[in-house]
Amino acid sequence: MKEFLNGMERFANANSEKGLQKILSDIAYTLEQAAIVSITDPRGTIQYANEHFEKLSKYPIEELIGANQRIVNSGYHEVSFFKEMWATIGSGKTWRGDICNRAKDGSYYWVDTTIVPFLNENGKPYQYISIRYNITARKLMEEEIRKNAELYEIITTNASDFIAIIDRQGRFQYVSPSFGKLLGHSLDSLYSDTLFTLIYKKDRQKVERKITQFRGIHRNAISLEYSLLDVRGGMHIMEAKLNEVQGSVDYEDQILVVMRDVTERVKSEEKIRHLVYNDQLTSLMNRNSFREQLALAFERARTRKQVFALVHINIDRLRYANDLLGHEAGDYLLAMVGERLKQKTGPESLLARIAGDEFAFIITGLTNESDIYNYAEEIRTYLEQPIQVGQQSYTLSISCGISMYPEHANQPSELVTKATLALGKVKMRGGGDSEMYEHGTSKMTLERILLENEMRKSVQQQHFYLEYQPKVFLGTGELTGVEVLVRWNHPDLGIIPPMKFIPLAEETKIIVSLGEWILREVCKQAAEEIKDGAFCKFAVNVSTVQMKEDGFVDTVFNIMKEFKIPADMLELELTESSFMDMEGMKESIQKLRGAGITVAIDDFGTGYSTFSYIKELPADTLKIDMAFVRDILENENSQAIVKAIVTLADTAGLNVVAEGIELKEQADMLYQLGCREGQGYYFGRPTTLFEAKQTNSKGSSCDNKK
């Protein structure tokens, strides 16, 4: 205080007490106008309060004077806060700090406070003068900033995206907290590292090159996929988008990197890819993959002017082994045939399981017809060696058909046909032999000609009839619809299995007229349902041959119009082969779905479908083939495949139906894996519509009231 007064005297006039008083008066006036001023006695009783104090606290001056300073205590601060303040000013020291007070109306305000103690001759405070400034707006802004920072921390720590800013050398300028959670590194250590050192070495050069290009003419956002390594050596596949930081001086010419961990998605897609291109029982290529590889082999041979042969193998009468030993033993026999083929043909051979009991491989390196035949025969006899199945020894009978390029064919499909014809000749002789294709081989066996003629007559004479298999919701057992199945009861030949006549119907195009008859019968039955006040969704199988027919879509619409059937009562199940000509099918499918008819992909996983088709085709439902349901209880691989299919189908917005459910435990497992609907002998065998609808009499979509 003395120093302050001495300074004022020098400033004013050492001989003018009046001048000094004027300066002090001016300072007091300035404070009075600019700040909240109060004077309290040593106990905190307010002796003086200025107008600013009155306005801010909303207490009248007469209520403030004589009241304790606690009148504006908000309760915001801890007791220790005020203890420390009183200890400071009680010792004669000035205290500074921010205080939250409460006004008379209950509102809160913040003040930047300076409390100056004035001491008597004994060095004890006799009064305190408080100078305060209203900082409520600043505090609110700070609180908003704090909340935003906290929210940002929560979002960036828990978000599925990983955000970073890097310079052109890959050095981190900013990393979101989620990086630590993903990689296990501390954030501080990341700032001393680069993005490039975290990238798996196989991808590192690619990323560095892209960032270099990004600096040049390619300044639009770029997308990359690469793998990051965590502290444990684990690999995370990241989908990243890189963009130049815009509108920031601090981060000028730097790159914003937004990443997402897609490891699980990629693994699921790899499982689907393996499912699509590989036979699950033998791990060999399936039909789809084999056809693709055969076409490539064909082109190589054409370019290099090489000779190669195709061998088509069939296990004779495998169904007898299934009947005698059971289906599990039958699967084991198939797996052993696949294993023996791998052993004899070598790891680099083009080898596939192309159907249930059929295999195929190509022979290269031999040019003489007899050498090729002898090699195929050697493999065939090796496959016929006894196989131990449990306590029994079982000997298979194997048939082989062989065709050669360029001797027998100029196109891959022709080569396949010639090998199949050669195999047919062996089968006609009873099997257990090999046959090289010969020019002029008949394309039709006597049985095939007979069957075709009888089928044409049976369509006209209506020797076909329909059966219905229930489809249920696995969660409740409620009926969701029925699948329509065609049956052939020949007056002389009796019941002919669909596996025998459907392929022939497709090959001869009889399926076109048969399919139209099926659709007409279904719509007629649907009309009866409507007449009875009931509702049932009918799923009808449609082949590629039908879809390719000019006017197929119009035929469907006309029949529905004739019987006045609403579109939501009809679902068309497309066979996998439909997707081999996806572009040709797409427009027809879009027209059908545009009219409200749902479309299902039938028997998924048996050799044609790929996940890219699933994502691109406008379908509604995916039906998992029974091959993946049969051993789902004991085979973890089947469980993983079904889970992957369900996950990716959900991503594509498809419903999933499992076929071939024979046990309650299978239904429970499929439901746990996310499958919504199912069908199979456990719920009901193909039967009449009336009996199929009895599967669930309450709450189903096929009950007696819509």
Image: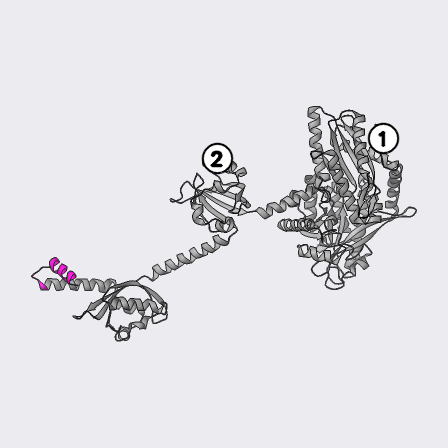
Foreground pick, 674 / 549: 674
Q: Is residue 418 in sight in this rendering?
A: no
Q: Is residue 54 above or below residue 141?
A: below
Q: Which residues are magenta?
A: 1-17
Asked whether residue 15 is drawn in magenta, I would say yes
Q: Amino acid at mark 2?
A: Gln
Q: Secondary structure at mark 1?
A: loop
Q: Where does residue 92 sit, x and y in percent of width and height?
A: 22, 66
Q: Where does residue 520 sit, x and y in percent of width and height?
A: 80, 50
Residue at (47, 51) in percent of width and height: 177
Quote the CA–CA distance across marks 2 and 1.
61 Å
Foreground pick, 641 / 595: 641
Q: Is residue 403 above or below residue 40?
A: above
Dot 1, how many residues are within 10 Å of its Cα: few (below 14), some (14-19), or many (20+)? few
Dot 2, how many residues are within 10 Å of its Cα: few (below 14), some (14-19), or many (20+)? few
Q: Where does residue 390 sit, x and y in percent of width and height?
A: 80, 48
Image quadrant containing the N terminus: bottom left
Identify residue for label 2.
Answer: 213
Foreground pick, 692 / 624: 624
Q: Is residue 468 in sight in this rendering?
A: yes
Identify residue for label 1.
Answer: 441
Q: Is residue 552 above or below residue 217?
A: below
Asked whether residue 130 is drawn in magenta, I would say no
Q: Where does residue 540 sit, x and y in percent of width and height?
A: 76, 50
